[in-house]
Amino acid sequence: MTNDISLLLIFFNNDAKECIEQLISRAFVIKTDKKVVGYIALSFKNIERKILTRRKQVGKYSRPALVIGQLIFDLKCQNKGYGKRTIGWVISIVRLVQKFLPLRLIFVDAIDKEAAIYYKSRGFEPLKGNEDTLVLD
């Protein structure tokens, strides 16, 4: 995370743009009425059943998941509810996609322990053997 929102936009316009063009992920700018506060990148992944922890998640096959590849906010905009609302928006995307395709999990590799704690507070659970890789069912 950065204090300078321009660094976020540089990353968004350069690195994220390549992933978008190659249909690897889709990135979304998060903004208020007045300014950009951050962005989120989403993609899909199959999660191997052997690393899932909850009994109802484990089945015969791997599980499709929506992946939060990046969720970044300007430091000046943290602790203002943007993350909570953005996670709620991601959950609503999963519910919409579920009407058309099998999708059950939201997956994230937390960038550090602080981020892992944040995701845990939002209901995410760590996968077997890795406290920084979390899933929401």
Image (cartoon, rainbow, N blue to C red):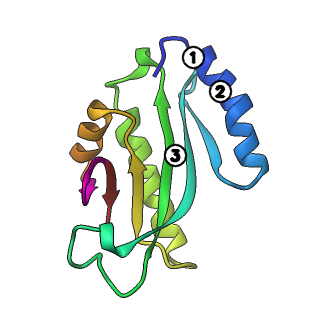
| Residue occupying image coordinates x 39% and y 42% | 85
Residue 129 on the magenta span: yes
> What percent of the width, then of the height, locates residue 89?
46, 51
Q: Kindly state the secondary structure of the residue where label 1 is placed.
A: helix
Q: Amino acid at mark 3?
A: Gly
In the picture, the disc for residue 61 is none
| Residue occupying image coordinates x 63% and y 43% | 27
> What percent of the width, then of the height, locates residue 8?
59, 23
Q: Mark 3 or mark 1, which is nearer to you?
A: 3
Residue 24 on the magenta span: no
> What percent of the width, then of the height, locates residue 5?
57, 17
Of the numbered discs 3 and 2, the one sitting upstream in the chain is 2
In the picture, the disc for residue 5 is 1
In the picture, the disc for residue 11 is 2
Q: Mark 2 or mark 1, which is nearer to you?
A: 2
| Residue occupying image coordinates x 79% and y 48% | 21
Q: In whole angstroms, how far apart are the C-alphas of marks 3 and 1?
A: 18 Å
| Residue occupying image coordinates x 36% and y 88% | 60
Viewer-proximal residue, 41 or 52?
52
Main secondary structure type of the part rendered in magenta: strand
Mark 2 is surrounded, within 10 Å at the Cα level, by few (under 14), some (14 to 19) or many (20 or more) other residues, namely few
